[in-house]
Image: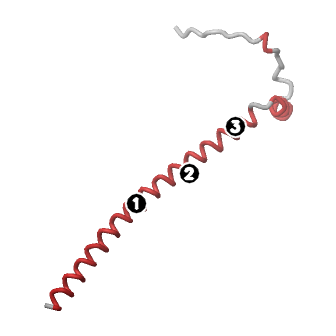
């Protein structure tokens, strides 16, 4: 009787351990995927933020003009800017 009880306890412990291990593995996989997605989104956010900070500043644009475009760019007032449409036929 003691042997049967001992074997039953050992088998049930093995079964419980297997179930817990499988559920933990699934949880780790899901956590890993979420972390990878977050890392990717953080990189995209940082790139966008960097572009916005550098390109939205008028001082930076004027500085870039002097560095890269020399006198090719002309400063305009907002009232002088208008829109136009291109028709591709």
Q: Residue at x 40, y 60 (%)?
A: 27
Q: Residue 52, how many percent across, how many down?
A: 70, 35
Residue for badge 1: 27
**73 to the left or right of 9:** right
How many angstroms separate mark 1 from mark 3 (CA)? 36 Å
Q: Residue at x 65, y 38 (%)?
A: 48
Quadrant assignment for the N terminus: bottom left
Q: Position of residue 42 (x, y in %)?
A: 60, 47
Q: Secondary structure at mark 3?
A: helix
Question: Is 6 in front, or is 79?
Answer: 6
Which residue is disc 3 drawn over? 51
Q: Nearer the viewer, residue 26 or 45?
A: 26
- For label 1, the crowd category at 10 Å Cα-Cα, with few meaning under 14, some 14 to 19 and many 20 or more, is few
- Label 2: how many Cα within 10 Å (few below 14, some 14–19, many 20+): few
Q: Looking at the picture, does residue 86 appear above or below residue 74?
A: above
Q: Earlier in the sequence, mark 1 or mark 3?
A: 1
Q: Which mark is residue 53?
A: none
The alpha-carbon separation of the residues under discs 1 and 2 comes to 18 Å
Of labels 1 and 2, the one closer to you: 1
Q: Which residue is mark 2?
A: 39
Depth check, front residue: 5 or 86: 5
Name the image quarter holding residue 21. Answer: bottom left
Residue at the spot x=42%, y=56% of the render? 30
* Among numbered discs 1 and 2, the one appearing first in the sequence: 1
Depicted 85 relative to depicted 13: above or below = above
**Relative to 34, does residue 74 appear above or below in the rendering?**
above
Q: Is residue 20 left or right of residue 9?
A: right
**At numbered mark 2, what does the secondary structure look like: helix, strand or loop?**
helix
Furthest-front residue in this view:
1
């Amino acid at each position: 009787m003691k042997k049967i009880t001992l074997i039953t306890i050992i088998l049930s412990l093995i079964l419980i351990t297997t179930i817990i291990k499988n559920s933990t593995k699934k949880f780790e996989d899901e956590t890993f995927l979420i972390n990878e997605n977050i890392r990717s989104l953080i990189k995209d956010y940082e790139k966008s933020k960097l572009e916005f900070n550098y390109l939205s500043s008028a001082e930076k644009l004027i500085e870039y003009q002097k560095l890269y475009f020399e006198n090719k760019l002309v400063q305009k007032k907002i009232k002088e800017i208008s829109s136009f449409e291109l028709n591709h036929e």
